[in-house]
Image (spheres, helix red, strand yellow):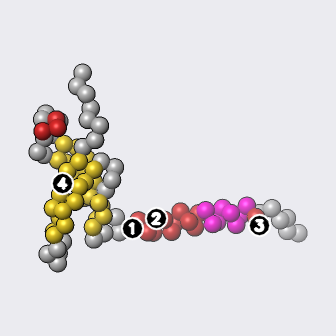
Amino acid sequence: FEPEPEKYSSELVIEDKAGNIDTTTLEVNKPIKREGWKIYQLSYDTKYGKYSRTSIIELVNDPWLILVYIGIFMVIAGSIHIFWVGRKVKQ
């Protein structure tokens, strides 16, 4: 049985399109947001454990996310509207 690490993180040097350089620490479940992208720490080279020099990261860009949130809000608003208006019986 091999013990799991309590936490793992990576030191990243990020350069944007304008040439600005930022050094930051990336941790599991704490993504970094840069220019519309989210950078996630997924894993590391488990063969070397805490001495691993390899990290597995994922970059996610979801331009449709705002529309998903708007859709969820519309469904909630519509449900509330039907709940209040639907109680009134029209003749």
Tell me, yes or no, if residue 58 can be seen here: no
Work out which residue is located at the far right of the displayed protein and give it: 91
Q: Earlier in the sequence, mark 2 or mark 3?
A: 2
Q: Amino acid at mark 1?
A: Trp
User: Quick one: 69 or 42, which is closer to the camera?
Assistant: 42
Residue where numbered disc 1 is placed: 64
| Placement of the N terminus among the 4 image quadrants | top left
Secondary structure that dominates the magenta span: helix
| Mark sitting on residue 87 | none
Q: Earlier in the sequence, mark 3 or mark 4?
A: 4
Q: Secondary structure at mark 3?
A: helix
Mark 2–mark 4 contact, CB under 8 Å?
no
Q: Amino acid at mark 4?
A: Glu
Residue where numbered disc 3 is placed: 85
> What crowding class fits label 4: few (fewer than 14 Cα within 10 Å), some (14-19), or many (20 or more)?
few
Inter-mark Cα distance, 1 to 3: 31 Å
Mark 1–mark 4 contact, CB under 8 Å?
no
Read off the magenta span. 76-83
Residue where numbered disc 4 is placed: 11
Residue where numbered disc 2 is placed: 68
Residue at 19% from the left image edge and 66% from the top image edge: 22
Q: Earlier in the sequence, mark 1 or mark 3?
A: 1
| Percent position of residue 58, x then y | 24, 54
Inter-mark Cα distance, 1 to 2: 7 Å
